Image (spheres, rainbow, N blue to C red):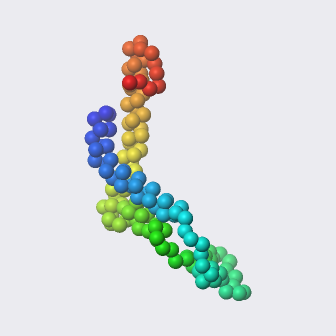
Amino acid sequence: MRKWHRWLSVFFGVFMLWIAVTGVLSQVAVLWPSGAPDAAAQAAATPPAGFECPEGWRCLPPRPNTSGIASLTGLFHHLHSGESFGAVGTAISVLSGLALVFFSISGLWLYVQMWRFRKNRSLAPRWFWK
């Protein structure tokens, strides 16, 4: 199990780092403080007088024009999900997610094995050791 854990981490580590960085950037772009909207943007976002959204519809005001890092949110999302690289990018993104699940399970398995080995050798059982 340890061999698989190490070899797969060499390959998928690069993709998982890519996914982590683009995920953080997409959240930073959303949370990045933007200036207060000007009067023209607020006027464009308000519906005309007497407008009512039809039942069963989801009426949203038009999105305000964003600038700076907030305008890159869509780009970061497409890079994060692998959509920018087509079907291969999406497949690698899904495989990286499955690899993360594998690393979590195999890492826990390796830790439990080391803990049991230490416990059976009549050494003081500890949660962490050197």
Work out whether 52 lies above or below 99: below
Point out residue 104 in the picture as x, y percentages from the top left corner: 42, 40
Work out whether 42 lies above or below 90: below
Q: Quadrant of the N terminus?
A: top left
Work out whether 39 lies above or below 112: below
Looking at the image, the residue that sits furthest to the front is: 35
Q: What residue appears at the point 42 percent right and 34 percent down from the top-left corner?
A: 108
Decide which of 23, 36 is in the foreground and name it. Answer: 36
Left or right: 103 as drawn, with respect to 28 = left
- Residue 124 in view of the camera: yes
Q: What residue appears at the point 41 percent right and 53 percent down from the top-left corner?
A: 20
Point out residue 51 in the picture as x, y percentages from the top left corner: 69, 85
Count how many numbered circles sit on residues in the image: 0
Q: What residue appears at the point 52 percent right and 77 percent down from the top-left corner?
A: 65
Left or right: 53 as drawn, with respect to 105 = right
Q: Quadrant of the C terminus?
A: top left
Point out residue 125 in the picture as x, y percentages from the top left corner: 46, 19
- Determine the image quadrant of residue 87: bottom left
- Determine the image quadrant of residue 64: bottom right
Looking at the image, the residue that sits furthest to the right is: 50
Point out residue 99 in the picture as x, y percentages from the top left corner: 36, 46
